[in-house]
Amino acid sequence: MRRRRVEGIHDPLSPPEHYGGQVVEAQLHLLDRQVLDVDEVPVVVVDDVELSDVPTDAPIPEGTAPPVITALLSGPVLATRIFGGRPPSSRLHRVAWRHIADVGTVVRLGVRGAQLDVTWTERWLRDHVIARIPGGRHDPE
């Protein structure tokens, strides 16, 4: 039995359109994944994803191109996971998608983590707190 094609009606059994780039299921492939830099040093954990061209509180019209990931977000989200809500966007640190080299079991960066703003709290603690502890300025021998 052959199906009849009707103009203007989308056939749910037809193959989906193909878009350039990698298709990523954010919840499965990105959220709660460890991010490693080029030296395999852990940098951060992905807490959220920033998308481009997604209207807020409005339905997305059919036929619209899929959104593109612009950044991975990380920050203090533990309280919001327990009590609900969202942290202010100013509290989230962004890792631009252009710095991502690979998405697999872990997310790999194409740059060193020390070059990113996301590690400023660790650098500040290292320079202002740990450095003041006797022996805190060098590795143990």
Image (cartoon, rainbow, N blue to C red):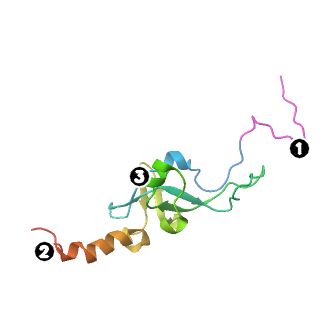
Q: Quadrant of residue 76?
A: bottom left
Residue appearing at x 38%, y 69% in the figure: 119
Is most of the magenta stretch helix, strand or loop?
A: loop
Q: Residues within 10 Å of mark 2 (few under 14, many from 20)?
A: few
State which region is magenta: 1-15
Identify the residue under disc 1: 8
User: Marks 3 and 1: CB-CB under 8 Å?
Assistant: no
Viewer-proximal residue among 73 and 128: 128
Residue 49's spot in the image, x, y percent?
54, 57
- Kind of residue at disc 1: Gly
Q: Nearer the viewer, mark 2 or mark 3?
A: 2
Q: Residues within 10 Å of mark 1 (few under 14, many from 20)?
A: few
Quarter of the image with the N terminus in it: top right
The disc label shown at residue 134, or none: 2
Residue 140 seen in the figure = yes
Distance from label 2 to label 3 (Cα)? 35 Å
Would residue 137 appear left or right of 7 to someone viewing this image? left
Would residue 122 appear left or right of 96 to someone viewing this image? left
Q: Quadrant of residue 134?
A: bottom left
Identify the residue under disc 3: 106
Does the stretch in magenta take in 13?
yes
Residue appearing at x 90%, y 41% in the figure: 7
Secondary structure of the residue carrying tag 1 is loop
Does the stretch in magenta take in 114?
no
User: Marks 2 and 3: CB-CB under 8 Å?
Assistant: no
Residue appearing at x 27%, y 77% in the figure: 127
State which tag comes first along the sequence, 2 or 1: 1
